[in-house]
Image (tube, grey):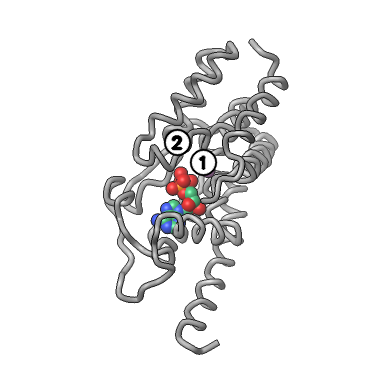
Amino acid sequence: MTESNDLIHRTEALVRQRLAGEATGHDWYHTDRVRYLALRIAADEQIAGAEVNRLTVELAALLHDIEDWKFHKGDDSVGPRAAAAWLGVHGVDPDLIDHVAEIIATMSFKGAGVSTPMRTIEGQIVQDADRLEALGAIGIARSFAYGGFKGQMIHDPEITPAMHESFEAYKTAGGTTINHFSEKLLLLRDRMNTETGRRIAAHRHQFMESFLAEFFAEWEGKA
Ligand code: ADP
Ligand code: NI
């Protein structure tokens, strides 16, 4: 098998090149921040006594958005397969490959009424890191970038938020970006898996609440 460090560097180069210039919030810097957050959470979990395989965490974080997801939205097998194929070429242990592919396959938010449990601590860590990226100032920026890409309105008072009961309903909904806050972003704080994730999410959640308060004050001509 390729040396761990070498594998990380090669994977990093692949992802950098694949996601360069991506305009909807899934660019290389997003992946790099997910990796950083995930390793930070992993370190805290280890201090708290958990056994964490850091190589699994780092590889899953690096590869989680590897496929050009815009063209495969809804087919959640494409990303895990591409990640597995890449790791396979480098002679990575099949159990590690399966674990990374499983994490990538089960990470995403799929609607307010759909539970997305993570089986392993490594998966819980990477899921928290990716979800933190949907929160706070960066989360707000990413949501409007994605909303613009999807052709959504910023806000329309006549369209009310919906609590989606299935992935199908969630991914085909033609909502607004402001509604995306109630439909997903404000729900994430209570779905974090780890203590560190919960702490960072609480701070970012509060910032989004302030943003929304200011947004509506301006909308109503009160600010
Ligand atoms: P995940 O990271 O759970 O797989 P996505 O890839 O769908 O989720 O989301 C990536 C980013 O785009 C996140 O910041 C997310 O909140 C945002 N996003 C997803 N769907 C919408 C939407 N309908 N409107 C605005 N932003 C969205
Ligand atoms: Ni992501």
Helix, strand or loop at mark 1: helix
Q: In terms of image quadrants, where is residue 51?
A: top right
The location of residue 33, given as percent across then percent down, is 65, 44
Task: Identify the residue under disc 1.
Answer: 127
Quadrant of the rendering where the C terminus is positioned: bottom right
Q: Residue furthest front?
A: 21
Above-or-below relation of 89 to 173: above
The disc labelled 2 sits on which kind of residue? Met
Under circle 2, the secondary element is loop
Front residue (pair 222, 89) = 89
- Indicate the amino acid at tag 1: Gln
Q: Residue at x 67, y 25 (%)?
A: 8
Q: Residue at x 43, y 63 (%)?
A: 177
Sequence-wise, the earlier of marks 2 and 1 is 2
Q: Is residue 218 above or below residue 39?
A: below
Instruction: Characterize the local packing of mark 2: few (<14), some (14-19) or many (20 or more) Cα atoms within 10 angstroms.
Output: some
Left or right of 223: which side holds 69?
Answer: left
The crowd level at tag 1 (other Cα within 10 Å; few <14, some 14-19, many 20+) is many
Q: Is residue 119 left or right of residue 96?
A: left
Q: Marks 2 and 1, how far apart in space?
A: 8 Å
Quarter of the view holding residue 214: bottom right
Is 181 placed above or below 60 here?
below
Identify residue for label 2.
118
Q: Position of residue 109 (x, y in %)?
A: 41, 46
**Which mark's residue is nearer the viewer, 2 or 1?**
1
Residue farthest bottom in this picture: 222
For the N terminus, give its image quadrant.
top right
Q: Are marks 2 and 1 in contact (CB under 8 Å)?
A: yes
**Picture coordinates of residue 215 (x, y %)?**
51, 76
Q: Residue at x 60, y 28 (%)?
A: 59
